[in-house]
Amino acid sequence: MRLFASLAWIALLCSAECVAKSSPNIQCLGKVLVDLLTDIRDSFSCTSARRCPANFSDVDGTCLYLDKIRQNSWDDARHVCFTLGGDLAVFPDANAFASALRYINSIVDEDTDEVPYIFVGGLDVAEEGVWRWHTGELMPLGAPFWGSSKTPGLHKQPDGGSLQNCAALNKHDQYYIHDGECDLNASPLCQF
């Protein structure tokens, strides 16, 4: 409907302009076509800010949602994200990881035991010790992604062997990635 109204408006303006200037019809038609294509392009263009679905927040160009209420196994957490139109979050680089940590820390109360673990989209189920995102891409190991031995009482991650095959952010280690049991109760961090 908007397109039809725009086309009618452009045709009316062009006709009036062509009559007033005695322009040849081909120039007038060219102007109508250019204006019409511009209007079509603008109606489909996205603005510079990414539009995130309900519940999701735009976090430096990525839509993220932390479900602080539900705590599930890794598979169930992933299903929660699927029902919202997304999947468990993955971090292609350190900047994306840092942005996600800022988002998490802005909505989680640091003084309570709220959201102690958060599942993200990494696992080493297919081959022990080879961590991959659910997309199939290799997960980066070491700093700044994985927890380190610098935190008292915690070991350098990943350290759980074949019993801990799913990636979770650990609040007690400033939400760095830890390997954990896939049936651990953790909140899903969804990405759209």
Image (cartoon, helix red, strand yellow):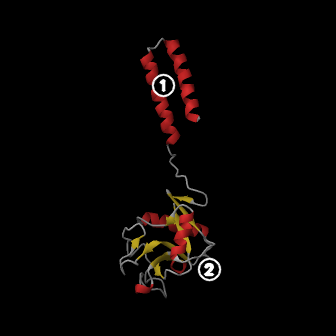
Disc 1 element: helix
Could you say which is closer to the camera, residue 103 or residue 51?
A: 51
| Image location of residue 9, percent across then percent down | 57, 26
Q: Earlier in the sequence, mark 1 or mark 2?
A: 1
> Please, which residue is most extreme toward the top here?
22
Mark identifier at residue 113: 2
- The quadrant of the picture occupied by the N terminus is top right
Question: Is 49 placed above or below 38 here?
Answer: below
Question: Is 66 placed above or below 24 here?
Answer: below
Could you say which is closer to the camera, residue 157 or residue 160?
A: 160
Q: Residue at x 43, y 84 (%)?
A: 149
Could you say which is closer to the camera, residue 19 or residue 62?
A: 19
Q: Residue at x 54, y 28 (%)?
A: 7
Mark identifier at residue 32: 1
Left or right of 105 on screen, residue 132: left
| Image location of residue 179, percent across then percent down | 45, 80
Q: Residue at x 41, y 81 (%)?
A: 158
Q: Identity of the amino acid at label 2? A: Asp
Mark identifier at residue 66: none
Neighbour tally class for label 1: few under 14, some 14-19, many 20 plus, Cα within 10 Å: many
- Point out the frontmost of discs 1 and 2: 1
The part of the image, by quadrant, that contains residue 56 is bottom right
Picture mark count: 2
